[in-house]
Structure formats: C-alpha cells, structure tokens
C-alpha cells in the first residue's frame, strides 16, 4: 500500500508543503507541492497510480467553511477560499477507485476504512478522501471498529 505523506521543505519551499508518494519498500514515486500546481500534480500522480494498479490512499484537506472562530479550525486567512477548487474531487475522480468526503468526525474511521478497502481490493487503485479543517479539529469520543470488516475484497465471477 502506498501512501501520500506531507513533508516540509527548507527556505522558500517551507511555504509550500511537499507531499511524497512512497511504496512500502521506500521507493519514492511522486512528489508535489500544495499550490495551484499541486492540483495538477495530484491528478498526474493519481493517473500514474491508476495506470500502475497501485494501491494508493490520498487524503486532501479542504478550505475551512466557517470564519471568525465559530468552530475549531475556522478560517484564519483570506487566502483559504482563494485556493479552493470548486469540485476538487472531480480533478481525480475518473482515475480513483473511490472518492469521498469526511463531513463529520463521527464517521471518519468508516470513511477511511472503506477507502482503504477500495484501494487494496482487486483491481487495486487510488482512493481519494477530502475533509475540511473544522471536521479535522472536531473532538469526538474514542471508538473502535472491527478490522475484519475492512479487509480487501477479492475478484468475483460476473453474474449471468
């Protein structure tokens, strides 16, 4: 399973976090930055992962949808809304096995579990999940899920 992880660069690059796609064996496949060019790079990386049937999980953060501190994670900069694509999932939707959005912290485990199940099931491919900052800052009670419920699904015969 490959995963995209965020890293920070140095000097000018520290203004734009860099994300790197790595395989379990440590080989770096793709890198891209969090700017408008970032959206293009995500699409290109997702196309490559889809063509290679590479099990990939992509988690993107969306701009905050509240302002003035109404919720934890509210908008703090005007730039947040300027950088938002209207339908960010549409950029990668046709190359992903699953695209989704976490809209509340109460179902984050189920949403991510389902995306990982899609990504690792045959045929393998990318899964893309997005969430706004307020959802990521939401406080919830700890809970657990049955791991057996989210295992990869093998290929099956076509129905008559």
Image: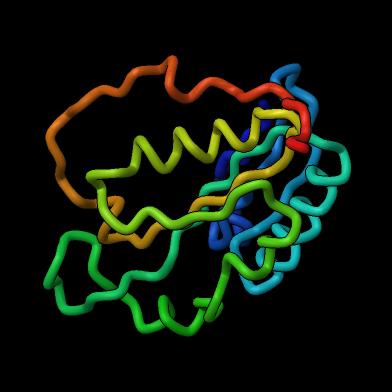
Give left or right: position of 89 versus 148.
right
Residue shown at the point (70%, 58%) measured from the top left: 42
User: Quick check: 76 above or below 33?
Assistant: below
Left or right, residue 124 beside residue 75: right
Q: Nearer the viewer, residue 49 or 6?
A: 49
Horizontal side, residue 92 vs residue 45: left or right: left
Q: Quadrant of residue 99?
A: bottom right
Q: Residue at x 47, y 25 (%)?
A: 150
Q: Can residue 70 be seen here? A: yes
Q: How far across and down, in percent of the image, does residue 21 sit? A: 70, 39
Location of residue 142 in the rendering, given as x and y in whole percent from the top left corner: 17, 29
**Position of the N terminus by quadrant:** top right
**Whether residue 107 is situated above or below residue 88 in the rendered picture:** above
Residue 91 percent across, percent down from the top left = 68, 68
Q: How many marks?
A: 0
Residue 71, above or below 50: below
Q: Nearer the viewer, residue 146 or 3?
A: 146
List the single residue furthest toward the front: 160
Colour option used: rainbow
Report which quarter residue 63 is drawn in. Answer: bottom left
Q: Could you tell me if residue 9 is visible in this image? A: no
The residue that appears at 74% across and 47% down in the rendered structure is 31
Q: Quadrant of the C terminus?
A: top right
Residue 44 appears at what percent x and percent y? 80, 58
């Amino acid at each position: 399973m490959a995963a995209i992880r965020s890293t920070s660069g140095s000097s000018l690059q520290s203004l734009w976090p860099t994300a790197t796609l790595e395989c379990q064996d440590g080989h770096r496949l793709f890198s891209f930055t969090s700017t408008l060019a970032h959206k293009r790079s995500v699409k290109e990386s997702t196309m490559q992962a889809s063509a290679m049937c590479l099990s990939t999980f992509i988690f993107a953060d969306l701009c905050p949808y509240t302002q003035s501190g109404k919720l934890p994670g509210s908008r703090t900069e005007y730039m947040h809304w300027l950088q938002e694509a209207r339908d960010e999932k549409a950029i990668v939707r046709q190359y992903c096995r699953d695209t989704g959005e976490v809209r509340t912290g109460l179902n984050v485990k189920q949403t991510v579990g389902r995306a990982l199940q899609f990504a690792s099931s045959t045929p393998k491919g990318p899964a893309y999940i997005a969430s706004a900052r307020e959802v990521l800052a939401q406080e919830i009670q700890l809970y657990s899920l049955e791991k057996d419920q989210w295992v990869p699904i093998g290929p099956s015969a076509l129905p008559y």
